[in-house]
Amino acid sequence: MTSRAPHAAVGAGITPEILAFYADGAEQGRLSDPRRRIEYLRTLDILARHLPPTGTVADVGGGPGAYALRLAADGYHVHLVDPVPLHLEQAAASSTHATSPVASIVRGDARRLPLGSRSCDAVLLLGPLYHLTHAADRARAWTEAHRVLVPGGMVAAAATSRFYTTWEYLAKNLYDDPAVEAILARHLRDGQHRNPTGDRRLFTTGYFHTPNDLTAEATTAGLRPHALLAVEGAAKLLPDLAERLRDPHRRDLLLRAIRRIEAEPSLLGMSEHILLIAHKPTPDSTATEETR
């Protein structure tokens, strides 16, 4: 497989505040941060259980390529699509030096993918949905995922839970700031997250889902939800999380504990990220919807 240099594509739009949030390059090292690595480890665990054993994968909103490069190393033919020029440069540099480079790196938008219809066995939406604040834009992203999938292909789509942030901001002692309470009140009310403070710990412009939102959006797009899972669970609230992840034995215990309760509906909102696994029905599919 060969890596292609980043190039412009139609539909590669991103709001200035979101672009500015990612312009410092911090995303490249985010998933290797001692406390944030739980998101990466758990996402890989879920993908390993649900991706087809081989095939073509579109990593939409793939950023600097953490997942794309790992999947390419595992033998998948991966197309990385992202709207942030810096992310594409970082991904291209990493892919150039990888033993198994990604197949292509393209500037593009989840709402208008630069990929052919029925060209992918799996689509990853591990970031776009929580940066698309309008329901119509999220619907377009889901429709595009459906379009590029082969019949029977799968989507893994991540959302940020609107409920987790209350506990995170309390744990980080951020709640004393009246602006923080106003931010929380808004996204608890309608899912719309805005951060006028300039504090990076409070993220940037986004939409925070309820678990039911994610399932409903996929179903409306003609996809068949299969599993709705907590990614980190409440693990990021553990004060010694970094130490647990450094110790192989304690890390394995933690990952097994999260997996046992990953699908419990009453606990999904406590996870920072929720991951939906859905499939594009085959023409002869008569199976009923299943979300477990």
Image (spheres, rainbow, N blue to C red):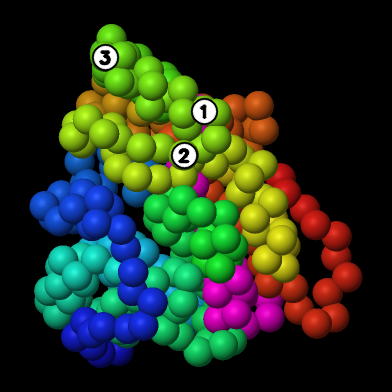
Residue range in magenta is 143-164
- Disc 3/disc 1 C-alpha distance (Å): 17 Å
Q: Name the residue under label 2.
A: 192
Residue at 61% x, 49% y is: 214
Q: Distance between the residues labelled 2 and 3?
A: 19 Å
- Tag 1 secondary structure: helix
Q: How crowded is mark 3: few (under 14 residues within 10 Å), some or many (20 or more)?
A: few
Q: Do the residues labelled 2 and 1 touch (CB within 8 Å)?
A: no
For the point 18% across and 34% down, which residue is it? 198
Is 290 placed left or right of 114 in the picture?
A: right
Q: Residue 108 carries which label?
A: none
Amino acid identity at mark 3: Asp
Q: Residue at x 30, y 20 (%)?
A: 179
Quadrant for the C terminus, please: top right
Residue 205 falls in image quadrant: top left
Crowdedness near tag 2: few (<14), some (14–19) or many (≥20) residues, C-alpha within 10 Å = many
Q: What residue type is labelled 2?
A: Gln
Tell me, for residue 188, which label it has, or none.
Answer: 1
Residue 91 visible from this viewpoint: no
Foreground residue among 67 and 165: 165
Q: Can residue 101 be seen in this view?
A: yes
Which of marks 3 and 2 precedes in the sequence?
3
Residue on which the image places disc 3: 177
Disc on the earlier residue, 3 or 1: 3
- Asked if residue 153 lies in the magenta stretch, the reply is yes
Residues at marks 2 and 1, CA–CA distance in whole angstroms: 8 Å
